[in-house]
Amino acid sequence: MEGGDSLKKSLTSLHGVINGKIGHGLETRVLQGLHVTHAEKGFMRFDFVVPNAISDVDGNWSVGALASLVDIIGLVTIYSFANRATSTVDLNVSYYSTATIQVKSFLFTCGVFLLGEHVEIESKVSANRGKLMHAVVEVRRKGNGEVIAIGKVWMALNKLTPQVSNL
């Protein structure tokens, strides 16, 4: 990991959201199982197994949950670059494929349980216009690299700093 203080704060905030110390239950649910595999200032890569809790009625990754994940990851990546909190001013997600939740797996005599699809997520800051920043978040299937979605997020910088709860 490279990037100094802003990267460290960014990852601390992300783990605070994943653990339910920052944000709301929705963000915690959407990010359940997210793992950082590479992080540097303005660039991050994640592994993610899509949990059953964020599936739609057809057993696919809910597009709303995917959009929320794109927004949060874009925010964390921009924070790692700018060291300032941001507000989303434009969010655009293009969906190219579905990620299924209903992958059956057998565990000897324990029966069948459901696993989500394994995906890779890559996020990078692609534009810095002073108080306005842009990040691109790509979600790809882990096995074959097929694009599931590409999110583009514009965020405005503000002077607020997220605080981790001590509760």
Image (cartoon, rainbow, N blue to C red):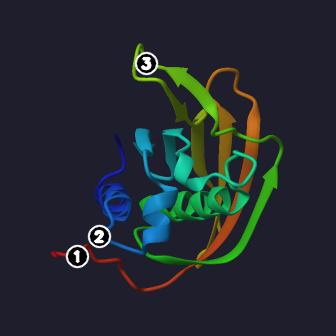
Q: Residue at label 2?
A: 21
Identify the secondary structure beneath mark 2.
loop
Amino acid type at image mark 3: Leu
Q: Check disc 3: other Cα within 10 Å, few if <14, some if 14-19, many if 20+.
A: few
Quarter of the image that includes the N terminus: top left
Tell me which label, 1 or 3, sits earlier in the chain.
3
Question: Which sits in the foreground, 161 or 91?
Answer: 91
Question: Which sits in the foreground, 140 or 116?
Answer: 116
The label number, if any, that marks residue 165 in the structure image? 1
Against 21, residue 145 (above or below) is: above
Q: Check disc 2: other Cα within 10 Å, few if <14, some if 14-19, many if 20+.
A: some
The label number, if any, that marks residue 41 in the structure image? none
User: In which image quadrant can residue 15 be found?
Assistant: bottom left
* Name of the residue lying farthest toward the bottom: 159
* Name of the residue lying farthest toward the top: 108
Identify the secondary structure beneath mark 3.
loop
Residue drawn at the location 53% of the way across and 65% of the way down: 75
- The mark lying in front, picked from 2 and 3, is 3
Amino acid type at image mark 1: Ser
Q: CA distance from mark 2 to mark 1?
A: 6 Å
Against 117, residue 10 (above or below) is: below
Identify the secondary structure beneath mark 1.
loop
- Percent position (x, y) of residue 127? 66, 61
- Percent position (x, y) of residue 46? 49, 40
Q: Is residue 160 left or right of residue 8?
A: right
* Residue 7 visible in the snapshot: yes
Amino acid type at image mark 2: Lys
